[in-house]
Image (cartoon, helix red, strand yellow):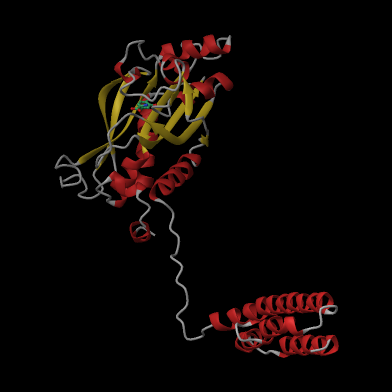
Amino acid sequence: MTLAELDAQQAQSLGEVAAAADAAALEQVRIRYLGRNGSLPAIIKQMKDVPQAERPEFGKHVQAWRMALEGALAEKVSGVGAVKKEESTFDCTLPGRWFAPGAKHPVSRVIEETAAIFSRLGFTVADGPDIENRFNNFTALNTPAHHPSMDASDTFWLTDNLLLRTQTSPVQIRMMTQYTPPVRIITPGRTYRRDTTDATHSANFHQIEGLYVDTKPVSLADLKSTLAYYAKEMMGSKAGVRFRPHFFPFTEPSVEVDFSCHVCGGKGCRVCKMSGWIEIAGAGMVDPRVYEHVNRARGDRAYAPEAVYGYAFGFGVERIAMIKYGIPDIRWLYENDTRFLSQLA
Ligand code: DAH
């Protein structure tokens, strides 16, 4: 074979690559020239018959052909392959993909509804960090230094001073140290406790805190009417509230707040454990010692106990969600099962 014949065959093979219409045709070209019994291996086998003087030049041409052909094939295969793939994935007989419709999480819904209800009463939403210090979470809230809630077994301590807040109450302190009265806020947020998870407990849950402090008289009756309004807006117009005496370090007097059972209307059922009432919140009049801690932190007497009046309350968001939507197990709220969420949509 002469060099001219060799080059003619190269041109022929590249022409066939260019003309190949699909992947199968390209494969045929590859087999014809590069396959085990193809033209190129045969020519290489016959190299020994080429006169010695021409052999190096001949060898170079063979090598150049092989590279040109392999390059052309590779380029064409990727192009043809891509076209082919696109054509083959469009199947107009396939059913369409189903996207699960989204639903707002019950915890988010309770927080948003609560914020909307209290905003009608003049409350704004305040925020505080999940990582708190000892002063805001305990000391300023008049929690005695050796109170069990401060134990490492109840609280996630990060350092001697920092912890994951066990309640949203520290936001009360943050707001009062930052603003002068009147202060009227609610503050929803995550809280953390070293609780073992079961149907009614979770180490991470949400609370909504409320605080109203004014220089005009504010009484326990105002607190009760505010929470009664909230109960009706949240649970339905027949819902009522009752106060039971209780103790919290940061309020005096302190109460526990029950809503009348929205399921049985107070007659007694499984949801309210036959009592007609469901425990919802802790609340009370802000303790003078809390004001004094705030004043010391502020360096003034903007919250002089004899000159200000205020109440506070706090409740669990999951608890309200479970009662309102009839969810028997708190863990359902964290499992991200869309079948559960879509039922509430
Ligand atoms: N922080 C309390 C708790 O986690 C709830 C609470 C009770 C908040 C009374 C208040 C309050 O603001 O006045 O159990």
Quadrant, the C terminus: bottom left
Horizontal relation, residue 80 to residue 60: left or right: left
* Res 180 seen here: no
Above or below 343: residue 265: above
Q: Position of residue 150 (x, y in %)?
A: 35, 18
Q: Where is residue 175 in the image (x, y as percent from the top left)?
A: 53, 24
Q: Position of residue 61 (x, y in %)?
A: 81, 78
- Between 200 and 253, the residue placed more toward the observer is 200
Asked where in the image residue 72 lies, by quadrant, the reply is bottom right
Quadrant, the N terminus: bottom right
Q: Where is residue 35 in the image (x, y as percent from the top left)?
A: 62, 83
Q: How many marks?
A: 0
**x 50%, y 11%: residue:** 304
Asked where in the image residue 79 lies, by quadrant, the reply is bottom right
Horizontal relation, residue 138 to residue 64: left or right: left
Above or below 104: residue 316: above
Asked where in the image residue 191 lies, by quadrant, the reply is top left
